[in-house]
Image: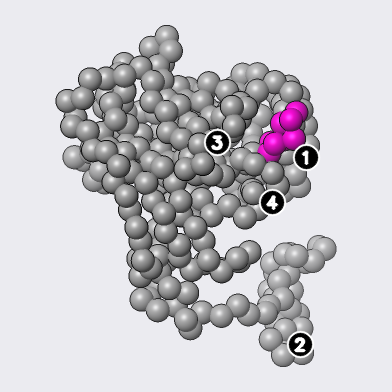
């Protein structure tokens, strides 16, 4: 598989505005097809965001809170677009990175936001001359009437998913990173993160009705300039969610070697996938023997 860096990449720089641009109370970034939109704005001196799909509310106004101070105006520092393809593995062999993006100044930090035809991704960046401890408390507020599939394991993200109306979640309840949401009009959405490197993983804590606050388990101490993982919301029908390339597109290319053609899928036996087969010395001997008999 060739690295994205080795692919032909076309980046269209639409507009670059100076940092002295007059601040605005609202900034909206729309997908190339114009259907998906994420809006950033201040309300009661609180920085918030809002996501819609063809005008339908996917994420209700939700607060952005993290440990670097913010201001009271938004400044568009740069607007850009990407339209490129790169090799990938899995459900299809070629991925399409096609979005409109913006870097938005918010006082002491910046928001980099991207709107794709199948969702939204954003991250926070800031200058840092030392070793900063960063905490992300962004909230995801869902509209009334949605159904959410979630699981409670916030360490390994491995557990049975359960389906519940959003109003059945209780304050203090914990959920793993991936939430799948169904809306009354038949749309779906899913939360995720991408570009996670040297940063605590994301999970959620229910803090108010319909409100899931980002919780980072573990400490994120960043040397040099801060760049958080991307917060991602994909939206569309189930086929759109399954085939989305957003997570790959916002993540760095593999740093294994310049040419990964030597990597091939293989077969294995795995004790965890069988009933009551814990990782013990005797079980590993047994599964090694089974793999040998199968010619793996």
What range of the chain is rendered magenta?
180-188
In this rendering, position of residue 295 left or right of residue 99: right
Residue 64 rendering spot, x and y as whole percentages: 44, 26
Residue 185 counted in the magenta span: yes
Circle nearer the N terminus (3, 1): 3
Instruction: Pick the residue in front: 109 or 236.
Output: 236
The disc, 2 or 3, on the residue closer to the chain's N-terminal end is 3
Is residue 206 visible in the rendered image? The answer is no
Residue that badge 4 annotates: 239
Say if mark 2 contacts mark 4, CB within 8 Å: no
Mark 1 highlights which residue?
A: 162
Which callout, 2 or 4, points at the residue further toward the start of the chain? Answer: 4
| Mark 4 or mark 3, earlier in chain | 3
Q: For mark 3, what is the residue?
A: 35
For the point 40% across and 65% down, which residue is it? 4
Asked if residue 296 lies left or right of residue 116, the reply is: right
State the image coordinates of residue 29 (x, y, percent, origin top left): 42, 33
**Residue contact between numbered discs 4 and 3, judged by CB atoms under 8 Å:** no
In 3D space, how far apart are the residues under numbered discs 4 and 3 (Cα atoms)?
A: 17 Å
| Residue 122, image x, y percentages | 43, 39
Q: Distance of mark 1 from mark 4, alpha carbons?
A: 20 Å
Residue 116 lies, with reference to residue 166, above or below; the image says below
The residue pinned by badge 2 equals: 294
């Amino acid at each position: 598989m060739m690295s994205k860096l080795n692919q032909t990449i076309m980046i269209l720089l639409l507009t670059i505005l100076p940092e002295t641009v007059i601040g605005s109370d609202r900034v909206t970034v729309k997908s190339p097809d114009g259907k998906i939109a994420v809006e950033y704005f201040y309300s009661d001196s609180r920085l918030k965001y809002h996501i819609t799909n063809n005008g339908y509310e996917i994420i209700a106004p939700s607060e952005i809170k993290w440990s670097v101070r913010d201001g009271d105006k938004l400044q568009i520092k740069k607007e850009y677009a990407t339209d490129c393809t790169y090799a990938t593995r899995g459900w299809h062999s070629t991925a399409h990175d096609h979005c409109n993006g913006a870097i938005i100044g918010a006082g002491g930090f910046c928001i980099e936001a991207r709107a794709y035809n199948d969702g939204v991704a954003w991250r926070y960046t800031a200058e840092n001359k030392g070793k900063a401890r960063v905490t992300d408390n962004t909230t995801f507020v869902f509209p009334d009437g949605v159904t959410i599939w979630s699981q409670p394991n916030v360490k390994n993200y491995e557990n049975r998913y359960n389906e519940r109306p959003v109003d059945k979640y209780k304050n203090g309840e914990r959920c793993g990173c991936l939430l799948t949401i169904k809306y009354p009009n038949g749309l779906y959405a899913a939360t995720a993160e991408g570009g996670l490197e040297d940063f605590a993983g994301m999970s959620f804590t229910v803090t108010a009705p319909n409100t899931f606050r980002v919780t980072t388990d573990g400490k994120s101490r960043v040397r040099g300039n801060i760049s958080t993982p991307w917060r991602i919301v994909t939206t569309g029908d189930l086929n759109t969610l399954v085939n989305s390339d957003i997570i790959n597109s916002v993540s760095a290319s593999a740093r294994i070697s310049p040419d990964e053609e030597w990597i091939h899928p293989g077969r294995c036996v795995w004790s965890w996938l069988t009933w009551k087969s814990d990782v013990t010395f005797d079980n590993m001997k047994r599964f090694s023997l089974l793999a040998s008999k199968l010619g793996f």
